[in-house]
Amino acid sequence: MKIDGFRGRLITADHADYDTARAVWNGAVDRRPRLIARCLDTADAAAAVRFARDHDLEIAVRGGGHNVAGTAVCDDGIVIDLSAMRAVSVDPADRTARVQGGALWADVDHETQAHGLATTGGIVSHTGVAGLTLGGGIGFLMRKHGLAVDNLLTAEAVTADGSILRASADDHPDLYWALRGGGGNFGIVTLFRFALHPVGPTVLAGPVFWAADDTADVLRFYRDFAAAAPDELGTVVRLGTVPPLPVIPEELHWRPAVAVVCCYAGPIADGERAVEALRRLGRPLVDLLAPKPYSAHQSATDDTTPHGWHYYWKSTDLADLSDDTISVIAEHAYRAGSPRSYAVMFHMGGAVGRVAHTATAYAGRDVAHNINIDAVWLPGESGEHAAAETAWARRFLDVLQPHRANSVYVNFLDSDDGTSRVREAYGEHIYQRLAEVKAKYDPGNTFQHNKNIHPG
Ligand SMILES: Cc1cc2nc3c(=O)[nH]c(=O)nc-3n(C[C@H](O)[C@H](O)[C@H](O)COP(=O)(O)OP(=O)(O)OC[C@H]3O[C@@H](n4cnc5c(N)ncnc54)[C@H](O)[C@@H]3O)c2cc1C
């Protein structure tokens, strides 16, 4: 097999590493593409798009391979795989970073933190920059520095006809708007340029854990604590069991618990003041909030969601954290059968909510909290086990129905979340505008192996 103008690696079913190359983060995804085109550069990606078009092949695009729905890999078609394109270069003078389309957040943090700089990324460092950014990009720094898309200055994209376009406020502004939240619908982004901000390199960060029985009390306190928190304080609530990490005393491992994970993007002393009341709440099982390198914090829980385990997600934005919502969460969060299943809630707001609703294609700017319910089971565990975990996640979402906002973060949608949930992620107005941009740049829906926007 040969692709004209392609200098990367072509992997087909007869290659020894085909199975490794087609595997994505979610081990429950098992698809067999006809061809994996592992690109070395933008020209390779353009050549692969033209080849796919000429041979009528369905295209899947792989950045970090982390999407839970496994959209980075397809059956029969071609995977345009950017995983060998992970370079990051920082310009400390103008505080920007150029990041290739297959980079992981660990790559970005590594290079930017060498200059004491950072930009908003995800909370697990082996997640891909591309998919996360194109859906919006939420993380610990967002309340201070905005979403990943709010820091995206330019993107270089290979569009459906194989053209290479630059999207920015001045170049193809409609494409630039759509790329900031509209996912992989508009082209293959081979290069991102992000704004950076001084962060750390030492920050006050880490989790405080309480016993699961204290969940309702912790969440009622947290609701008010988070509402009054300065923008510098990013928090994520984790409900599940205490993960068996070496930094946590062994006797606590796997114990049902609620954690508030913090990261203060400012001076340590200010951070100490900002988290003081939280640390005094009730009787924590363990308090791991301490000054540490920002990049260490960003990778601290990497081992709790490894590649190859089986995952199934259900998610929604929450209307509020009323006492009733909290009761439902406290009642259902710990009903999973597996000690590896958990739920996470991101506290939004701050800089995210100060950007105009239609300035980018990311729709959830007025939401205060979301919840992502993550069912997890091991590759060797039975179908019955998998069914029980997925049933838990579905039931948990069902009982949250009266407490849901009419929105969901597109990057948390799974493979059984269809068109109606994609529309829910954007709302009618933004979805319609995305459909118009799609009709201009990808009228034939070449990029459809994703949370699809139909050309309209
Ligand atoms: C463990 C874990 C933690 C997470 N934490 C966060 C978090 O803190 N914040 C957050 O916002 N999200 C988070 N997510 C969700 C994450 O944003 C999505 O899973 C996202 O799709 C991952 O990006 P990726 O590049 O790894 O995805 P992939 O699986 O590689 O790609 C997913 C889709 O994105 C598109 N895509 C990928 N690369 C490109 C490209 N270069 N050009 C154009 N389109 C492309 C394609 O449509 C593709 O189907 C997390 C996910 C996991 C698994």
Image: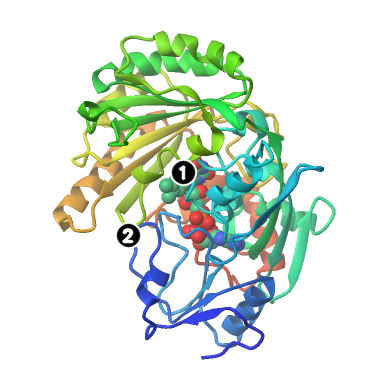
Which residue appears at 64% of the width and 53% of the height? 432
Outermost front residue: 114
Residue in the foreground of this view, choosing between 223 and 433: 223
The coloring applied to the image is rainbow
User: Hey, which quadrant is residue 26 in on the image?
Assistant: bottom left
Which residue appears at 61% of the width and 39% of the height? 120
Q: Is residue 41 above or below residue 136?
A: below
- Type of the residue with mark 1: Val
> Is label 1 within 8 A of ligand 1 (CB to nearest ligand atom)?
yes
> Measured from the top left, where is residue 414 in percent x and y?
40, 53
> Is label 2 within 8 A of ligand 1 (CB to nearest ligand atom)?
no
Which residue appears at 65% of the width and 42% of the height? 114
Numbered disc 2: secondary structure: loop
Q: Earlier in the sequence, mark 1 or mark 2?
A: 2
Identify residue for label 2: 27
Outermost bottom residue: 1
- Type of the residue with mark 2: Gly
> Measured from the top left, where is residue 407 in percent x and y?
51, 39
Q: How crowded is the residue under tag 1: few (<14 C-alpha within 10 Å), some, or many (20+)? A: many
> Is there any visible trace of residue 451 in the rendered image?
no
